[in-house]
Image: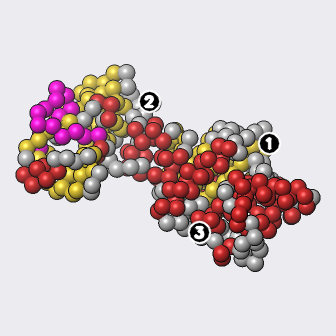
């Protein structure tokens, strides 16, 4: 297990600055995700850790070893990418053994470690098959075994599941977490898939235009985004513009065109003053539909569009000229609500209203 310490890392490609002086510590044994919109710098950061890019400024250290300028093959990182790139003419066992043969490990040791790696990804019985005789998920397991067999100092994964269908992705993401934890590997994982990250990450970083916007556990980032960009990027949310009328100890009261809300301040460093313009972020599943108003955080309105999806119903709640997204779990009263356009109250807990700097 190693700690990966990134300090003031800047990477440029000609006129484009892909990473702007990033600081980030990935703790030993952590399964850490890099997330962000296309072009934000996720792959550049991963490839810099792997050694394929040398940064213009800053340092990368594995524990206390400065690896910033070390060649990729000397960093001993295990890698797994979107395309598994297995050798088609080699058997599964030969593919997995390849890295050890290159490192001139003794034959008996290679056999033992290949068997162990294939066992750990549950592919031992496929050792003699060729890659084209395997399913996509099985090929991905072989690629994982190949990354593990060299006993890497850390594991670097770039969209490892994007070629798989939805069901296999679910299965493999749990498998990747199991293997990382079993091998106690510090793992950096790049994905576009928020659910993948929310479900298995220990922590994640949200990047935008080469900057890190927020680092935290999935729950922190989802429930307490510190900026509008993060709230917008992770999950779904409605933004409501407003003005601070009172604020103290991380809580605030905000007047908006649809009423007054009590909420929590998303960014601990943001100390809003009375009169400051702010944005509220409220997730669709946080609203509760009620017949009567609650004492605070209730808005009167009616249901406009309504979509039934089985375990959840999605409503457009019309209030004060604005349509809010509301998701109701276990929508037992769907047809009554959907058909009548009845007058209701949408209520939200104070802890589910996040006050963000405008
Ligand atoms: P995606 O999610 O689309 O894979 P990303 O977050 O991984 O995107 P990067 O591939 O790291 O983004 O790219 C970051 C920025 O650096 C982009 O503006 C991209 O165009 C630029 N860039 C990346 N690699 C190169 C390169 N080899 N040459 C020039 N520009 C590059």
For marks 2 and 3 on the same chain, the one whose residue lies earlier in the sequence = 3
Q: Indicate the quadrant where residue 63 lies.
A: top right
- Viewer-closest of 44 and 302: 302
Q: Nearer the viewer, mark 2 or mark 3?
A: 3
| Mark identifier at residue 136 | 3
Residue at image coords 11%, 47%: 302
Q: Give the x, y percent position of residue 169.
A: 52, 59
Residue at image coords 40%, 38%: 223
- Viewer-closest of 160 and 319: 160
- Viewer-closest of 269 and 266: 266
Q: Give the x, y percent position of residue 276.
A: 30, 33
| Secondary element at image label 1 | strand
Label 1 beta carbon within 8 A of ligand 1: no
| Mark identifier at residue 65 | 1
Residue 72: say if magenta.
Answer: no
- In this picture, residue 245 sits left or right of residue 147: left
- In this picture, residue 317 sits left or right of residue 116: left
The magenta stretch spans which residues? 286-301
For marks 1 and 3 on the same chain, the one whose residue lies earlier in the sequence = 1
């Amino acid at each position: 297990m190693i700690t990966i310490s990134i300090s003031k890392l800047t990477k440029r490609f000609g006129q484009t600055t892909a990473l702007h002086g990033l600081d980030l510590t990935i703790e030993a044994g952590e399964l850490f995700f890099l997330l962000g919109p296309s072009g934000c710098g996720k792959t550049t950061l991963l490839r810099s850790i792997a050694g394929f890019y040398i940064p213009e400024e800053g340092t990368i250290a594995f524990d206390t070893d400065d690896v910033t300028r070390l060649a990729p093959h000397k960093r001993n990182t295990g890698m797994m990418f979107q395309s598994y790139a297995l050798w088609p003419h080699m058997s599964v066992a030969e593919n997995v053994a390849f890295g050890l043969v290159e490192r001139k490990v003794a034959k008996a040791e290679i056999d033992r470690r290949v068997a162990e790696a294939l066992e750990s990804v549950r592919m031992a019985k496929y050792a003699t098959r060729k890659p084209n005789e395997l399913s996509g998920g099985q090929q991905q397991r072989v690629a994982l075994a190949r990354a593990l067999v060299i006993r890497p100092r850390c594991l670097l994964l770039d969209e490892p599941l994007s070629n798989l269908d939805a069901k296999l992705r679910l299965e493999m993401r749990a498998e990747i977490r199991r293997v990382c934890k079993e091998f106690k590997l510090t793992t950096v994982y790049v994905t576009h898939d928020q659910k993948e990250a929310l479900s298995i990450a220990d922590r994640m970083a949200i990047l935008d235009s080469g900057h890190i916007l927020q680092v935290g556990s999935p729950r922190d980032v989802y429930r307490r985004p510190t900026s509008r960009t993060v709230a917008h990027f992770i999950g779904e949310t409605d933004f409501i513009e407003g003005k601070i009328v009172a604020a103290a100890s991380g809580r605030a009261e905000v007047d908006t065109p649809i009423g007054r809300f009590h909420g929590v301040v998303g960014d601990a460093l943001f100390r809003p003053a009375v009169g400051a313009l702010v944005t509220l972020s409220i997730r669709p599943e946080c609203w509760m539909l009620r017949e009567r108003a609650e004492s605070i955080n209730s808005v009167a309105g009616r249901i406009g569009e309504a979509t039934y999806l089985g375990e959840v119903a999605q409503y457009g709640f019309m209030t004060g000229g604005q349509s809010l997204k509301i998701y109701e779990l276990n929508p037992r009263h769907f047809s009554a609500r959907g058909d009548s356009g009845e007058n209701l109250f949408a209520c939200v807990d104070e802890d589910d209203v996040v006050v963000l700097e405008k």
